[in-house]
Image (cartoon, rainbow, N blue to C red):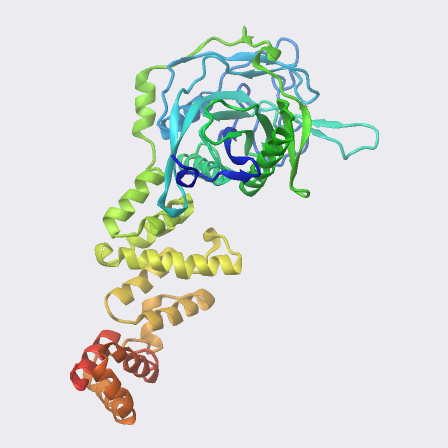
Amino acid sequence: MTASAAPHKLIKSATGDWEVVIGMEIHAQVTSNAKLFSGASTAFGGEPNSHVSLVDAAMPGMLPVINEECVRQAVRTGLGLNAKINLRSVFDRKNYFYPDSPQGYQISQYKSPIVGEGEVSLELDGGRSVTIGIERLHLEQDAGKLLHDQSPTMSYVDLNRCGVALMEIVSKPDIRDAEQAKAYVTKLRSILRYLGTCDGDMEKGNLRADVNVSVRRYGETAFGTRCEIKNMNSVNFIGQAIEYEARRQIEIIEDGGSIDQETRLFDPNKGETRSMRSKEEAHDYRYFPDPDLLPLEFSQAFVDDLKAQLPELPDEKKSRFITGFGLSPYDASVLVAERESAEFYETVLSGLADKARDGKLAANWVINELFGRLNKEGVEIAASPVSAEQLAAIVDLIGEGTISGKIAKDLFEIVWREGGDPRALVEARGMKQVTDLGAIEKVVDDIIAANPDKVEQAKAKPQLVGWFVGQVMKSSGGKANPQAVNDLLKSKLGI
């Protein structure tokens, strides 16, 4: 394969083309009312150390008890990733000292995780697609949080997050550029939110990514030495960090140096990564099975029951929108990207008198008119002034020919600003489309009589009839039926 035929973006430099190899570890906070091994609350924003049980604080003699809901959520996520579910898994102790981890170790899973290999399919610009392998998903507990700005001489510790359940989703090193990396995080977040297993709120730290980056000359098969960029909580920053880190590594190698395996942080203000510490290996953590927890075992029937209750996921929903309503792949992708967007469109569909006829028209209105206006005004879809039911009524009015597309835009504006029932507004304000040919005919005759030169041009070049249609629509205030006008003009002009 030539460099130009590469299915992903290569980095060009003085010595040739380079390829980036990226693997990710996504830490997703499990949607659950209680922590992984205690009954303490997982609610966000409580007073420091107000959601801490004796287990979380590692008081002597306290024993962890597994939260079944967290197990269910991990299995459901695995099923959503088309992954192998392991009916037997083991919790291990990962030993390291840090002030916000009172146990002196983290309960995690090492050799026997709850979920094995899976995959995520991505659609990229230009109609390209790529599949990213999932290596594993395991359950583990989160650490607390150190607060360094509360005192000039001391650091404070808040253990509210300590013990909160995390799913660590480890990808294979299949990602090959920043675009794919951003698409992967976005798609994974979407799947988690559809499943309801993680809210995906990156600002609150409920979804964080550790990004492993290495480089190699294009065509080489061996992996280079990787550096891990820790705790990324923004899709755009992930892209920026990968671009910078790849360039940094290439420059070092081209200057005759070598890459040190290390953990780095990304500084979004400077747009660069910087060294944090040398990277630990698995043996540095002295993993061993946690003696306080039995192996986690469940039946295939438990898994099958969860699988039967899974919601329709983005890829399935997209396929249904395309085949059922004739949507373009792009429009379907826009609608299914966020669960709320898809649900809004589905509600619009349910309010249509003729879904087969108007499903595509409804998609156009949701994406172009509604989403466009929401973005412009900075309004979330949950707070949209125009409800799905009101939008369905507007689309129905267009589909049945009661109003034209132009009148519909005016109607949309009225509903956005004032609210109200679209059908009642059309009646009360006399917004109905004129389909009576008698009423339109005089307007058509007047325009033809006033523009003899245009008449001759249209007879020679029939597509110029569009100019006449525009004039009639303008003269009638947009109320004339465009198809009726078009037919009448062709008849009058003899074309």
**Relative depth, front residue between 306 and 261:** 261
Instruction: Identify the image quadrant of the N terminus.
Output: top left
* Residue 59 picture quarter: top right
Q: Is residue 392 visible?
A: yes
Please say if 42 is above or below 333. Answer: above
User: Percent from the top left, x then y, of residue 60?
Assistant: 66, 10
**Relative depth, front residue between 323 and 463:** 463
Instruction: Identify the image quadrant of the C terminus.
Output: bottom left
Residue extending farthest top: 291
Q: Is residue 272 left or right of residue 166?
A: right
Please say if 102 is above or below 167. Answer: above
Residue drawn at x 64%, y 23% is 260
User: Percent from the top left, x then y, of residue 400?
Assistant: 23, 66
Please say if 89 is above or below 441. Answer: above
Residue drawn at x 30%, y 18% is 301
User: Percent from the top left, x then y, of residue 298?
Assistant: 37, 14
**Relative depth, front residue between 281 and 39:** 281
* Residue 306 picture quarter: top left
Q: Is residue 338 left or right of residue 26?
A: left
Residue drawn at x 60%, y 12% is 285
Residue extending farthest front: 15
Please say if 438 is above or below 7. Answer: below
Q: Is residue 29 visible?
A: no
User: Percent from the top left, x then y, of residue 246?
Assistant: 57, 34
Q: Is residue 459 left or right of residue 299?
A: left
